[in-house]
Image: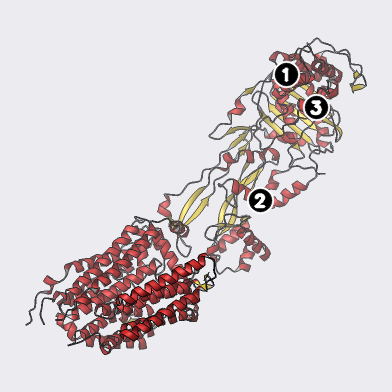
Amino acid sequence: MARNVNAWKTVDKFTIFLYLILVFFGWISIYAASYDFDQASIFDFAERSGKQLVWIGLSFILAFCIMLIDARMFETYAYLIYTGFIILLLFTFAFAQEVKGSRSWLMITDTIRLQPAEFAKFATALAVAKMFNGYNFKFTQPSNFFKIVGLVVLPLVIIVLQKETGSALVYFSFILMMYREGMTGLVLFGGIMAIVYFVLGIKYSAIDWLGAPLGEVIVLVLICVALIFIVRYFAENKRVARTLSYFYILAALVVAILLLCKVAVPIFYVLMGVVAVSVVYLLLVYWTTFSSKILVSVAVTIVSVAFMFSCNYFFNKLQQHQRTRIEVLLGMTEDLHDAGYNVNQSKIAIGSGGMWGKGFLNGTQTKLKYVPEQDTDFIFCTIGEEEGFWGSCLVLALYTALILRIMVIAERQPRPFGRVYAYSVLGIFFFHLFINIGMVIGLCPVIGIPLPFFSYGGSSLWGFTILLFILLRIDASRGEHF
Amino acid sequence: MRKDYNLEKRKFVIAGAVLVIVAVYVVRLFSLQVGDNDYKRYADGNAFQRKTLYPSRGFIYDRNDELLVYNQPAYDVMMIPREVHDLDTLDFCNTLGITLEEFDRYIDDMKDRRKNPGYSTYTPQVFMTQLSTQDYGRFQEKLYRYPGFYTQNRVLRQYSRPIAANVLGNIREVGVSDIERDDYYRRGDYMGDLGIEKSYEEVLRGMKGEEILLRDAYGRIKGKYEDGRYDVQPVSGRNITLSIDADLQAYGEKLMQNKTGAIVAIEPSTGEILALVSSPTYDPSLLVGRERGKNYARLTRDPSNPLYDRALLARYPPGSTFKPTQALILLQEGIVTPETRYPCTGGFVVGGLKVGCHAHAAPINLVPSLATSCNAYYCYGLRSMLDNRQQYDSTSTAYEVWKEHLVSMGYGYQLGIDMPTESRGYLPNRHVYDKVYGVGGWRALTIISIAIGQGEILATPLQIANLAATIANRGYFYTPHVVKAIQDSVIDSLYLQRRYPTIDARYYDYVVEGMRMAVTDGTCRTANLPDIEVCGKTGTAQNSHGRDHSAFMGFAPMNDPQIAIAVYVENAGFGATYGVPIGSLMMEYYLKGEIDPSRKHLEERMFNSKVEGNSGKKR
């Protein structure tokens, strides 16, 4: 039995409220960021703030139209939409002119151009959600898992080929949704640990500690600690985890005493030995319990050690400018003119804002164009400089509220379709926030992706508007049974 | 409808991850924005171009408001190293008229932190200084081709007359030690060197201002920050009026040409110095502009050492100009009365000791002894004082009393003139003699030559002129000074207070009478002007550097003194030969404005004579 209700009555007003605030703040930030001293009006259509106002108006119409569409249509045509955008992406890749080194822009007229990659996100989210909603679909089945991954990776690969690596990386945000839908947490954990190992291994590789590179020593210790957690929480074997911890504490004590007695400890080999003993011990445990999760733990450990050894090798295989970017981010080298210039200027702009900021339109760093891409990827600098710490925190709080609100919406969906789509949206917003602001404050590598609703540009604004309003439309119909 | 409650718990993990990352970002933002760091400073360095506005340096006038020193514009080439790019070095050098080697040297000098402690690639640095007006015009036209370069207006000095170099001093670029000592200065700034440019530096220099300009990432100026609300306007230096009479100074320098020595003329009623001539001298314009370094080195190497201000620094034996001080001390201590007579048998002859004198009537009392400059009188007088065991318990005690009187008259210590340097002369205390002759090992006869201004005693021309002023005032003087007035300010109160030597005023009349008699009937009859009552005292100072110094000390008119003067001409023989004519011509010129035709020959002789001096010589 289907019951159609007026979508405007059940729509999530709080989310719309957040959306409107963010879009408004975004608009005045663009005005501030592109403000020139002799500029006249915020409504001047020759200026970026004026143009953005047009985009905003069109987004509102777009959002309104989405609200008029029957929620079921999105599910029904999900694969069609997905296919359509994949074709568009391929078409763009094949025929588009190069803009700033990438083939991702579709020229509508000379001045109006669209970036299909921004729209492919919602299409992918819809397709994935539809697949999850399939009858008797079990994500834990490997074949299903690979189907989902395939749906996500296909646009990713095309976008990488378009040389829009930043936009492509956004598709990794689907991992969050997959985690929620039952993917083993080990993948998430492994991913985080891989980043940690990489950072520490590279950053401290040049420092010598007791005859071994400090980076590798730290990573080996972390691998041991991680193993305890994996055995405890993934393999759920408290006894073995406890035994391992005792063993590590004992080993640590012995090493500490030897060091205090000024005995030269070949620390690297000792740690490798400890890891090897753990592996052998776990294999023995497997011999008695036949728990496959123990075997996975062993595999993770061995892969981790291998990863550690390969890190430095691959790092040195990277291209020079990529290596420099990473080195700058890790604070290993100071390169304030090339790779580090953007981030350094961005930090200067934000840092100079202080607690309360310099006031609207009073930022010197952003006004005087010290910060590159200041109305697109580095728009957060303007807020940081002009509105200070409290303004930055307010923006962060608004996003956090939006993300948590999406989570609330996701969890109240009656069907997997809505939930999966909602978590996909959540992941995409979170990823953009995480990378964009992290980059601007120097905590993440420079990956050129926009800050949702803030960065100048019609494509990204429309993309995020569609993403959000399809969710709101689906949510508005959550009471309908179909 | 499927619901997996175990999986639903994962929302907390996801929410937790979001909150943790947001928290990390908040902490990071806090440390960037609120925490203590340099980002604010960097931001200012980025966006603000602080342009120094140089004040005009104060002008210098003479006592008759004749402008002596004023300013001329000069231009420095400044560069902001970080902003220099695509420089066509060869074209740049051609425009500035420098060679590539000079270009490299300027760059090296600029980057050398020992020479330029304030070097930074972000801030304006002095590339080269003192561009000529032609080079400036050419450079300004092509400036757009050289990003990172601009010109900065500076102020150089210009002198209306080539006189009084020793008084005026000059300005020079600050050195590293100046920058370290006073953080007002930046590389390329100018400061006073020598003369009143140095001693009145803080009055003359004014205060630098600052203009804060906004500039964008490409270095383009986008206007004034906050419409100039934080700009600081420069404060012009204050003008100074000297007590020097430029005409008298010029006349004195002309009289002293080709001679070595000094003239100091003081207005007794105020202590204002009317002329402070040191010879040989130089044209102050030599030390202006880009040739300054070369000219300065040349003046330094010059064996006659023109940079040495003999009026303030040369220490001469005072010779007979010292006798008035002796007369005053003997009267004050009651050793002699005006009627006391001493014999003179061609000099002072006691035991094996003889201090020669010239022919005059004898025995002689105080007034004629000054007029004839009788050595014997003063030797007897000093012996009577130092060997007087009723009045003083030892020679040392008597000597100290004698010395203290002289100190009160300005000998032995700096007088406190408002010039950067001044010698204190030399007046030994008893310990010096104790050391040489042993305690108690000396008596009046041991040191008798000090009675006639010879021996160990040394004085500067300024101290001797000050004595003339003291006598002219009948018992007091003002600390001599060269600055009469400062615009919008007052001169140091030190220069407005009378200083009284320890001699009673009534005794001065005898000395004045003696000095008047010296002019009318004594040793300096050449100084006798037709209608002005001149008082004077010659000096013929024996010294270890060859011929005697010719000295004169005097004042005029006797009963309303307008000018007191001391003249020293090194190695020129008798006081009457050079000292008296020069001193009297100076007084006549100052009081009458012209030289009486009957005395023109004297003037002529002084202008054309030439005497080799030796003080301050490089050996």
Between residue A300 and residue A354, name the one nearer to us.
A300
Q: CA distance from mark 2 to mark 1?
A: 47 Å
Pointer 2 local density, CA inside 10 Å: few below 14, some 14–19, many at least 20: some
Q: In the visual, does A205 lie left or right of B468?
A: left
* Residue B289: mark in rendering: 2
* Residue B433: mark in rendering: 3
Asked if residue B52 can be seen in this view, the reply is: yes
Name the amino acid, label 1. Met
Report the residue at 56% width, 47% height from top: B183
**First in sequence: mark 2 or mark 3?**
2
- The reply to whether label 2 and label 3 mark residues of one chain is yes
Number of marks in the rendered image:
3
Name the amino acid, label 3. Tyr
Please identify the residue farthest to the bottom as the structure is shown: A143
* Residue B558: mark in rendering: 1
Quadrant of res A234? bottom left
The colour mode here is secondary structure
At numbered mark 3, what does the secondary structure look like: helix, strand or loop?
helix
* Residue B521: mark in rendering: none
**First in sequence: mark 3 or mark 1?**
3
If the image is split into quadrants, where does the C terminus of chain B sit?
A: top right
Q: CA distance from mark 3 to mark 1?
A: 38 Å
